Amino acid sequence: MTSVLVRRLIASDAASLRQLRLDALVETPESFGSSYEEEHTLTLEDIHAWISPANDGAMFGAFADGVLAGMVGVGRQRMLKMRHKAHIWSMYVAPAQRGRGLARLLMQAAIAHARTMRGIRQVQLSVTANNAPAAALYASLGFDVYGNEPEALCVNGKLYDEALMSLPLAGE
Ligand SMILES: CC(C)(COP(=O)(O)OP(=O)(O)OC[C@H]1O[C@@H](n2cnc3c(N)ncnc32)[C@H](O)[C@@H]1OP(=O)(O)O)[C@@H](O)C(=O)NCCC(=O)NCCS
């Protein structure tokens, strides 16, 4: 049986994270705003900055038998007037490990972290409108759709709408 561990990523995970992120951008380019072309030149120093951001954000990894198989990031909006909002980014589980609860564990870790971030009132994310598995995951964790961006992404000439979702944390 595969052992699964979800934990916050640390500097020594940078090489594995870099590889998983590039795998994700190649496998499901329509799931991410960024692209392989923009990230394949990133150095381990660049990835360190994701793992140890200047603000109070964090990245979490899911390890299957010790191998990084899933990731998610949670960050704080930078601008002064938006610092009460956190966002989820880079949600991905490698195909071989899907359907085993890794994404749910990762999201629970990211949301728990957002709850520790001072003054955060909501967690936001966007999901490509045809991505039923991800939308179902987020809805099951309490996220609601608050908007829709038509033609949000253009990937290899194909246009994709995105649903905008948020999870309120205020008042808890
Ligand atoms: C979406 C993704 C992260 C789900 O990862 P996963 O580890 O397989 O998900 P889990 O096993 O934790 O499932 C959690 C929930 O997601 C939903 N879900 C997962 N796979 C699903 C599927 N094939 N169909 C419908 N719902 C699905 C369900 O709500 C599930 O809960 P349940 O098992 O209680 O029904 C994964 O498919 C993935 O990486 N996809 C490509 C990248 C991507 O779409 N990222 C999201 C960008 S917004």
Image: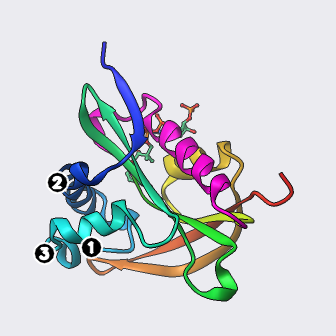
The magenta span reads 92-119
Q: How is the image coloured?
A: rainbow
- Disc 1 to disc 3, how far (Cα)? 11 Å
Does 140 appear above or below 37? above
Q: Tell me the tag on residue 41.
A: 3
Closer to the N terminus: mark 1 or mark 2? 2
Viewer-side label of 3, 2: 2
- Return the disc, 1 or 3, that comes first in the chain's sequence: 1
> Mark 1: which secondary structure?
loop
Residue mark closest to the camera, 1 vs 2: 2
Dividing the picture into quadrants, the one containing residue 98 is top left
Residue that carries the numbered disc 2 in the rendered image: 15
Q: Secondary structure at mark 2?
A: helix
Q: Nearer the viewer, residue 166 or 3?
A: 3
Which of 163/36 is in front?
36
Q: Amino acid at mark 1?
A: Ser
Spot occupied by residue 172 in the image (x, y as percentages of width and height): 83, 51
Q: Name the residue at 64% across, 87% down.
A: 80
**Hey, which residue is sitting farthest top in the picture?**
1
> Can residue 128 be seen in this snapshot?
no
Residue drawn at 46 percent across, 41 percent down: 103
142 lies left or right of 26 = right
Image position, residue 14 (x, y; %)? 22, 55
Residue at x 69%, y 87% (from the top left corner): 81
In the rendered image, the vertical position of residue 45 relative to residue 17, given as above or below: below
From the viewer's perspective, is residue 168 above or below residue 39?
A: above
